């Protein structure tokens, strides 16, 4: 009977230790850095939260990799698109939607993205040249 109590006490002590460690470590890791924060992007507001800058900063890398850009002209087009998004001349949601649609195109998604984005931007009166 006493061995049963001893086993139960050790098991209970183990769970107590896990709960204490989780409560101490959990909040610190969650509050350590804002989700998506990057060290190379300055936090101008000083509040540690800058979703638009992170999203736009990651946009160029996302487009280059997701669209499998290979040629200098393709990288230049992507750079122009990112610049227009940063200057609020081109809606980010338009770029993201076109990107998602073109990713499924085979064998190479970039030409589909470029053509579709040019057409959709032209409907809004935006030139991408």
Image: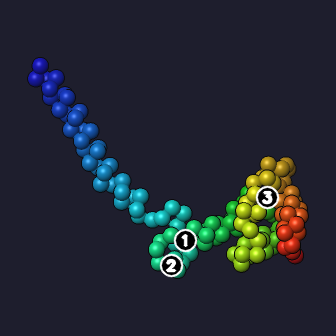
Residue 73 visible at all: no
Residue at the spot of label 3: 98
Of labels 1 and 2, earlier in sequence is: 2
Residue 8: x and y, percent?
Answer: 19, 29
Q: Nearer the viewer, residue 121 or 32?
A: 121
Residue at the spot of label 2: 45
**Crowd band around label 1 with a 10 angstrom C-alpha radius: few (<14), some (14–19), many (20+):** some
The residue that appears at 52% across and 80% down in the rendered structure is: 44
CB under 8 Å between callouts 1 and 2?
yes
Residue 16: x and y, percent?
Answer: 24, 41
Residue at the spot of label 1: 50
Rendered image quadrant of residue 52: bottom right
Residue 82: x and y, percent?
Answer: 73, 72
Residue 123 visible at all: yes
Q: Between marks 1 and 2, how big is the CA–CA gap?
A: 8 Å
Q: Is the residue 3 above or below the residue 71 in the image?
A: above
Q: Nearer the viewer, residue 19 or 107?
A: 19
């Amino acid at each position: 009977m006493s061995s049963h109590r001893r086993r139960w006490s050790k098991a209970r002590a183990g769970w107590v230790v896990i709960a204490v460690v989780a409560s101490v470590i959990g909040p610190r890791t969650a509050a350590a850095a804002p989700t998506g924060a990057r060290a190379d992007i300055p936090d101008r507001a000083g509040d540690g939260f800058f979703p638009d800058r992170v999203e736009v900063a990651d946009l160029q890398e996302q487009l280059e990799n997701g669209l499998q850009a290979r040629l200098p002209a393709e990288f230049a087009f992507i750079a122009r698109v990112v610049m227009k998004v940063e200057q609020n001349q081109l809606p980010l949601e338009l770029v993201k939607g076109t990107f998602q649609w073109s990713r499924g195109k085979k064998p190479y998604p970039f030409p589909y993205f470029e053509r579709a984005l040019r057409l959709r931007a032209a409907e809004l009166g935006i030139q991408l040249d």
